[in-house]
Amino acid sequence: MEVVDQVPLMNGGTGDTSYASNSLCQKKGISMTKPITDDAITNLYSSISPKSLVIADLGCSSVPNSLFVISELIKVVDELRQKLGHPSLEYQVLLNDLPGNDFNTIFKSLPSFQKKMSNQLGVGVCPIFISGVPGSFYGRLFPSKSLHFAHSSYSLHWLSQVPEQLENNEGNICVACTSPPIVLRAYHAQFQKDFSMFLRCRAEELVVGGRMVLSFLGRRSEDPSSKECCYIWELLALALNDLVSKGLIEEETMNSFNIPQYSPSLSEVKSEVLKEGSFSIDHLETFEVNWIARDSKLMMNSPDAFFDDGYNVAKCIRATVEPLLISHFGDAIIEEVFCRYREILSNCLSKETNNFISIIISVTKNG
């Protein structure tokens, strides 16, 4: 059993394989769901009108996406308070991730972020106080009734630990179409345990009427081993198994590796929220995001990226799971793993849909 908070999930820094440089498809998902997030923060401010607004971003990683979300939330609130004739309010922003997260990268970007926000909001706007909060969001992070708004994007599909009873998941690294029923049940049980704990902790920390918007990888099918949520991981397992056949990875080492990731269905998410009982559901839906997200600046430095969809997706997945792979297999085989993974993806993505399914849920803390 591997506990996630002992190994960082994302590649830090701003280099070529960093999560900061390879999270464009996540930003695309955030942009697509902006109307839902805007609606939640608008309803919050309209009903509570706090003099100081406390916002938490859970699973901020080291990427600009977190600050993009925060800036959009603050702009919506500032525009609304001006319409209502309210004075400027103070903003407290709490950026949370695991202790091993590369907080330094995001902190280094704060001066330019503050300057940009000051220019956009104009004179007379109160300062934005930003701090980091290291710790697992599957436990308490903030004082009771201290948060007004909680946001999390593409983090909650990561479990707190690799589930137990995965001995029969040989050749796979996650839930897969060939996984036996006991493996599917183990992953689902871990999701239930983790998500219910997440909800209980946030219920303590949010004020009555507080809002929470969460988006994460999910699925439309009720089958947890459906292709729509497992395919990308099955192809990575295929790349690893190719290295087993070449003698570069021991078969026993391969069979003992599993990723702590689960893509729930809408009904599984809804069930846990209703069971916990502290929140009313304002919005719940699935949406599709294309894996292929291109940045014109990156294209100039890496011309292959424009022509090779496998290149883009392999880099995105590498930025996400490389620390887990290195922790289990060592770093000697990493380049070969992702070289093979890129080849497999390039071949398969030309024949399959390039979209991944996401879930977004917006909730209000009950009184």
Image (tube, helix red, strand yellow):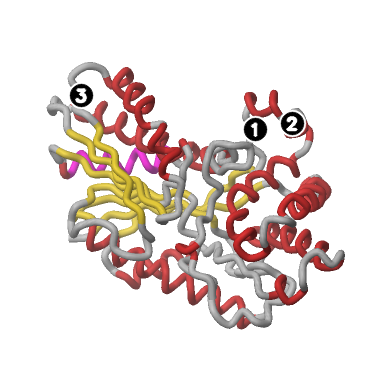
Q: Earlier in the sequence, mark 1 or mark 2?
A: 1
Location of residue 179 (image quadrant): bottom right
Asked if the stretch drawn in magenta spans residue 44, the answer is: yes
Q: Disc 1 marks which residue?
A: 294
Task: Tell me which label, 3 or 2, sits earlier in the chain.
Answer: 3
- The answer to whether the residues at label 1 and label 2 have Cβ atoms under 8 Å apart is yes
Check disc 1 and report its element: helix, strand or loop: loop
Q: Magenta: predominant secondary structure element?
A: helix
Three-letter residue code for mark 1: Arg
Q: Are marks 3 and 2 in contact (CB under 8 Å)?
A: no
What's the residue at 48%, 73% (across, down)?
190
Residue designated by label 3: 125
| Nearer to the camera, 71 or 213 | 71
**Placement of the N terminus among the 4 image quadrants:** bottom right
Task: Check residue 108 for magenta coloring.
Answer: no
Measured along the vertical axis of the image, is residue 265 above or below residue 295? below
Q: Is residue 213 visible?
A: no
Q: Give left or right: position of 224 versus 195.
A: right
Q: Amino acid at mark 3?
A: Val
Which of marks 1 and 3 precedes in the sequence?
A: 3
Residue range in magenta is 34-47
Please tell me the numbered disc located at residue 306: 2
Mark-to-mark CA distance, 3 and 2? 42 Å
